[in-house]
Amino acid sequence: MKASDKVYESLRADIVEWRLAPGTVLAEVEQSERLGVSRTPVREALGRLVADGLAVQQRGRGAIVSEVSEDHVEDLFVLRRALECASAREAAKSAQRSAFNQLASRFEAAVAEVEIPGSQESYYQLVQLLDESIDKAADNKYLSNALRTLRVNLQRVRRMAKDNPERLKASASEHAAIARAIASGNPEVAAAATTVHLHQSFTHIMAHAAGSERQSP
């Protein structure tokens, strides 16, 4: 892996996991010293983060971690609904759609497992596997490329709502419904199941964001 790729992956993870908070200045010298590389790969990585929307360039300050506002979340979900519903429809038309029955069973089992401490990361990996399976079944490189960039920002937004056990249980059931709908070969049912999940996710995230603002001094 190139040095710039390693820097990009490291900084992206720090931003997504909120170890680098919105507004943090990503100074080239500081980051190159912290990560043990020259300034060139840091500069290249910062350019990619700006392209992803995880950082912005400010005159006189360089790159800083971008803010996450309610408007930002709403805009992300508008795009997410359009792309993920389209992808689910296409996946339901795939000749390999029966493989989604196994994924549905795994999500159904996860409903009981997500309450176990330390299980959340395995659950998010299962979600990623479903996303990748839908992308592959949809077989549309433009959709998958657009979703890949979008999901980086969604991972960051998801962390705003923390790992609420009840929400994770509901989310597992919703993902199971999406997988079952794709396996059934009904594009509109697959899109509808996706719409329900996205509505519930958006509502939960916005409610948590509003609660956090009320608790702020």
Image: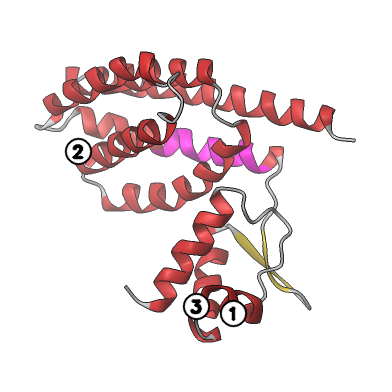
Cα distance between the residues tagged 2 and 3: 33 Å
Taking the spot 51% from the left edge, 59% from the top edge, the residue there is: 12
Nearer to us: label 1 or label 2: 1
**Magenta residues (range):** 72-83
In this view, the residue in front, 66 or 33, is: 33
Nearer the N terminus, badge 2 or badge 3? Answer: 3
Looking at the image, is 45 positioned above or below residue 108?
below
Determine whether the residue tagged by mark 1 lies in a helix, strand or loop.
helix
Q: Which residue is mark 1?
A: 33
181 lies left or right of 119: left
**Residue farthest to the left, as pictured:** 95
Label disc, if present, on residue 137 of the rendered structure: 2
Q: Is residue 78 magenta?
A: yes
Q: Which residue is mark 3?
A: 44
Amino acid type, label 3: Glu
Disc 1 + disc 2, Cβ < 8 Å = no
Relative image position of residue 68 (x, y in whole percent): 68, 46
In this view, the residue in front, 111 or 103, is: 111
Look at the image and tell me in which quarter the N terminus lies: bottom left
36 lies left or right of 93: right
137 lies left or right of 171: left
Cα distance between the residues tagged 1 and 3: 15 Å
Q: Main secondary structure of the magenta part?
A: helix
Determine whether the residue tagged by mark 2 lies in a helix, strand or loop.
helix
In this view, the residue in front, 130 or 11, is: 11
Nearer the N terminus, badge 1 or badge 2? Answer: 1
Nearer to us: label 2 or label 3: 3
